[in-house]
Amino acid sequence: MSTRIGVVTFPGSLDDRDASRAIRIAGAEPVALWHADHDIQGVDAIVLPGGFSYGDYLRPGAIAAIAPIMAEVIDAANKGMPVLGICNGFQVLVESNLLPGGLIRNANQQFVRRDQKLIVENADTAWTHRFTKGEEIVIPLKNGDGGYIANDETLKQLEGDGLVAFRYAGVNPNGSLNDIAGLTNARGNVVGLMPHPEHAVEAGFGPDTPEAMRSGLDGLRFFEAAIEALTARV
């Protein structure tokens, strides 16, 4: 029986189908989950995709965090289910208190779109264990509210406990404190990041590499890692 990974669609989600495609390419079965339901359909893991849930009213991710299905997502995450939040999904994780801190308007007040270099800081999570700590990868980035913030105490804890999953390399595109691009929880099952790994899973459609244009596949390893972690549990 194949691994089943749910993808939540909120009003305003843009990358739910891209996430589903990435899951399928990685070898799992994507399962569509609807924001207004209270049923995660027995999935093994969950992806909260990018977009502008509920039009980013109040704050990005703030309304989605209290959508009906999030009660089940939060409960599943607290019980150890792998959950990945991508861009707006990262914002939802923060607003749901599954990850600490906050995300605000980019420092330059502009929407940023670029192929972004990242340094892998934590390779011991359900979503990152196919990377190597210190490895440089390239993942597409597109956001207007990606500036990570937290108070000094939280930043100290994140750094001290190794909970920074990814850090921007070369350039900090949105003014995130400590160059933070992504986080993990202490258990390692919940990961959030601003760049979009689902856009780097298929040759011909990913970032450029020294070998060839559009050949970057670094994002595929996120989804393969989750499948591998779930398979190992059986």
Image (cartoon, rainbow, N blue to C red):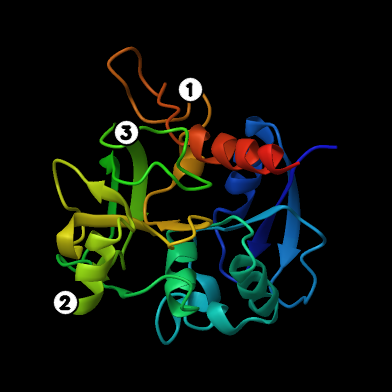
Labels 3 & 1 near each other (Cβ < 8 A): no
Instruction: Read off the residue under disc 2.
Output: 152
> Which residue type carries mark 2?
Asp
Tell me what residue is drawn at x 45 percent, y 83 percent. Answer: 57
* Quadrant in the rendering for residue 132: top left
Image position, residue 13 (x, y; %): 57, 63
Q: Nearer the viewer, mark 2 or mark 3?
A: 2
Image position, residue 225 (x, y; %): 55, 37
Label 2 vs label 1: CA separation?
42 Å
Residue 106 vs residue 216: left or right? left
> Which residue type carries mark 3?
Ile
Instruction: Read off the residue under disc 3.
Output: 137
Q: Nearer the viewer, residue 220 or 97?
A: 97
Tell me what residue is drawn at x 50 percent, y 78 percent. Answer: 96
Of mark 2 and mark 3, the one earlier in the sequence is 3
> Which residue type carries mark 1?
Gly
Kindly tell me whether residue 24 is visible in this rendering.
Answer: yes
